[in-house]
Image (cartoon, rainbow, N blue to C red):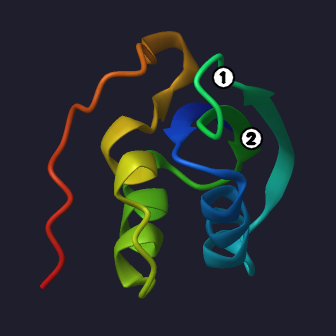
Amino acid sequence: MNTYKFRAECLIDVAEFIKAMWGIHLGSLTVEPSEVFPDCEVVVTTNSNLQEVLDLLLETNKDLHVIFETIQPIEHYNGKRIRNYIRA
């Protein structure tokens, strides 16, 4: 299992993330509230690699840019936006 961490703008984005990941194995998901509500941080375990997760996020019609830009393996997570969210 791979463990990732990301920031989300709100709990609705976390729900959309779960829907995007439906059909692949999610081992666990923990939401940590941020001091700046409604932002939150999420730790998720899955069998998918990071590229598979990013591809699923891009396939959604939802605006999950903060998740896409911040998701990293937990050991590398720093909460900063590290990639650009560009949808075709």
Q: Where is residue 76 in the image (x, y as percent from the top left)?
A: 42, 14
Residue at image position (68%, 35%) is 42
Binning the other alpha carbons within 10 Å of mark 1 as few (below 14), some (14 to 19) or many (20 upward) gives: some
Q: How far apart are marks 1 and 2 (CA)?
A: 20 Å
**Mark 1 secondary-structure assignment:** loop
Residue type at mark 2 is Thr
The quarter of the image holding the C terminus is bottom left
Question: Mark 1 or mark 2, which has the lower sequence index?
Answer: 1
Pick whichever, 84 or 54, lies toward us.
84
Q: In this view, does 4 lie to the left or right of 76?
A: right
Q: Name the residue under label 1.
A: 34
**Relative height, residue 50 to residue 2 (above, below):** below
Is residue 78 visible to the viewer in this orientation of the structure? yes
Looking at the image, how many numbered discs can be counted on the residues?
2
- Badge 1 amino acid: Ser
x and y percentages locating residue 49 in the rendered image: 50, 49
Rendered view: 35 above or below 28: above
| CB atoms of marks 1 and 2 within 8 Å | no
Position of 11 relative to 78 (above/below): below
Where does the N terminus fall, quadrant-wise? top right
Residue depicted at x 45% and y 79%: 62
Which residue position holds label 2?
45
- Judge left or right: residue 68 versus residue 27: left
Closer to the eye: label 1 or 2:
1
Place of residue 83 in the rendered image (x, y in percent of width and height, measured from the top left)? 19, 42
* Residue 39: quadrant of the picture: top right
Counting other residues with Cα less than 10 Å from the Cα at mark 2, is it few (<14), some (14-19), or many (20 or more)? Answer: some
Disc on res. 77: none
Q: In this view, does 23 lie above or below 11?
A: below
Closer to the camera in the image, 47 or 83:
83
